[in-house]
Amino acid sequence: MSNQLKTITVIGAGGKMGMRISANLQRSDYQVFYCENSPQAQAQIGAQGREISDAASVVPLSDVVILAVPDIVLGKVSETVVPQMKRGAVLLTLDPAAAYANLIAQRDDIEYAVAHPCHPSVFLQRYTKEEHEDAFGGVAAIQHIAAAWENGSDAQRAELAQVINVMYGPVDQVHWVTVTQLAYLEPTLVETVACMVGAFMKEALDETVKHSGVPEEAAKAMLYGHIQIALAVAFRATNPFSDACMIAMEYGREKIVKPDWKQIFDQKELDIVIARMLKIDAIRR
C-alpha cells in the first residue's frame, strides 16, 4: 500500500466505472469512501457491501479523490469537490477530455492527474475462463494504463501508480504521458479511429448479409477470423498480405478512406472532437 496516499474517495461510485474500480478498491488496504447521489445507484453500492458516505464529510479527509462521473458533468462536479479537498491531495479523473478542455476547477495547492485504462490487448494470451470473459479489464485479464500527472515527480507518480494498479487491476504497466498526449490516444486513436472502424465493420457485415443473401453465420465466421488475421499481419507481421489482398486493400482505401484523413491528428481537430464530446462550444485555453 502507498506510504502517503492512504485514504481514497470515489465520487460517482454507483456508475459503471465507479462500480468497477470500487470493487477492486474494496478488496485493498486503502481506506475508501463511496459517494453517490442517485438512490438507484446507492442501492447497487449497498448490495455490494459498501457503505455510502457524504462527500462533504469525507472529501476533506482524502488523499485521493476520484471523479468517476461522466465527462460532461466533470466540470460542474469539480466545482463542488475541489474546494472541499485538503491541501496536497490528488484529484484523479478517469478520462482526459475535461482536463484537456480546462473544465476542471483549479486550485494551486492540490494536484491533478488522469488515468485511463487501455483495456486488455487483442493479442493478450488468456489462460482461464475468467480472463477470456474479461473484455473490459479490471477483473481477470491484465491491461495497461495510460496516465498523466504533469506536475508530479517520479516519486509522486510511483505513489499514485500503486492506487491505479489497484483500481484497474490486474495491471501490467502504467504509461505516463501528458494530458494532450492522452487526449490523442483517446479520443483520436481509439474512438475516432478504432471504435469507428469496429462499428463500420459491423455495418459492412450487415450490408453483406442484406445485399448478397449469404447466411449471417457464414458471414460472421468469415469476418471474425479475418479480423484476427488482419490485425496479426498488420501489427505483428506474422505473414505478409497476399498480392491479391494488397490490391483489394488499395481499392478499399480509394473507395472508403479520405485522402486527407490524417488531419484528425491536427490539434485544432482534437479541439473540435473534444468540444463535441463535452457538448460545449469550444475548449478553454
Image (cartoon, rainbow, N blue to C red):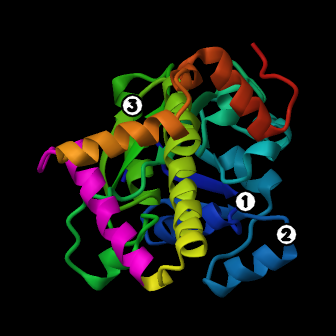
- Which residue shows up at 70% across the image and 31% down it? 273
Three-letter amino acid code at the position of disc 1: Gly
Viewer-closest of 144 and 21: 144
Viewer-closest of 86 and 118: 118
In the rendered view, would you say 136 is above or below 106?
Answer: below
Q: Where is residue 119 shown, x and y percent of the image?
A: 42, 56
- Which residue shows up at 64% across the image and 27% down it? 110
Q: What residue is pinned by disc 3?
A: 176
Q: What residue is pinned by disc 1?
A: 12
Mark nearer the N terminus (2 vs 1): 1
Mark nearer the N terminus (3 vs 2): 2
Q: Where is residue 14 shown, x and y percent of the image?
A: 71, 69
- Which residue shows up at 40% across the image and 32% down it? 157
Q: Is residue 222 visible?
A: yes
Q: Per the image, is 154 magenta?
A: no
Mark nearer the N terminus (1 vs 3): 1
